[in-house]
Amino acid sequence: MSRTASVIFFLPGAQEATSLSTLIERLVRTTNGNPLGKWGLEHRILRSTASNLADDKTHPPRLHHILHLLNWPQLTHIVISGGPPSPNGNADPTQALETIIAIPYAQQASYIQLLKLKMGALWTPRTVLQVANGSAYEAGEITIRLGDLRQLVGPGAHHGVVCFLQMQFEVPGEGEDGLGGGAMEVSVSPEAVAMAEQSAKDALTEFWQNSGVGGTARETWRFSGPGEAENGLGEAGLWCDVLRLRK
C-alpha cells in the first residue's frame, strides 16, 4: 500500500536577504536537487463569528481556509477546521473536526464573493498570506517546495520561510488469494503502517538535518493514504495546520 509523508519546516522571522537563498544553497544544491520550476501559494483564513458570543473554552471557533497551491494549479482547496463543543465543555484541538474539499480554481473568486455577500454574518475575514517567489526541486524520492511567507493584505510583513518536503513510501502487507482465484487482497496491519511511517519520517528528518540549515524550525507532519493524496487533500490540510498558526 502506498502512502505519502509530508512535513513543513517553518523558520519564523528569518532575514529575507539571506534566509531563502541560504536555504536553497544548503538544502537544494548540497543534495543535488533538480529544479521543477516556480512555486507559490495563497491562503485566506476566516474565523467563525459564533465564537465572539461565547467562551472560547467551551465553544472553540471554526476556521475557514481558502488555499491555492501552484502545484495544483487547477484547484482551490477549502478546509474547515474546528468543531462543536466537547461534551465535557473543554476544547481539545487534537479532536477538532476537519473537512477538506477541492473546487475548480476558476470558481475561487465567486466562492470568496459568496462568503462576503451571503455569509458575512457567519465568517469574519482574518489574514491573507502568500508565497510569491517560491521554487520547487526534486532530490531523489523527495520533493522540495520553499519560499518566503508574506502577509498580502495590510502591512507586507515577512513572517518567515517555509519549506515543504514530501516523499512516497510503501507499507508492506500480507497477500491473500481472493475467492475463486480473483484479484490479490492485501492485508496491512496498523503496526506495519506505524513502522513504515516512522521510517519515512526518519528519512525526511535526516535529509533536513544533513542540509545544515541553521536556525530553529517549527515542524508539522502529516501522513496521507491514497484517498487524501488524490487532488492534494492531505497536502492542503497540512498547509492549513501550519498557516492557521499565523492567524
Image (spheres, rainbow, N blue to C red):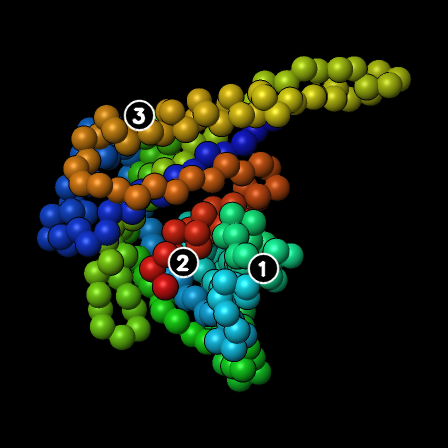
Number of residue marks: 3
Going by the numbered disc 1, the residue's amino acid type is: Gly
Rendered image: mark on residue 179? none
Mark 1 lies on residue: 89
SS of the residue under disc 1 = loop
Mark 3 lies on residue: 206
Rendered image: mark on residue 244? 2
SS of the residue under disc 3 = helix
Q: Mark 2 or mark 3, which is nearer to you? A: 2
Instruction: Name which quarter of the figure residue 244 lies in.
Output: bottom left
Q: Mark 3 or mark 1, which is nearer to you? A: 1
Query: In the shown orientation, is residue 107 left or right of residue 198?
Result: right
Residue 129 position, x and y percent, is: 33, 63
Going by the numbered disc 2, the residue's amino acid type is: Arg
Q: Are marks 3 and 1 in contact (CB under 8 Å)?
A: no
Going by the numbered disc 3, the residue's amino acid type is: Glu
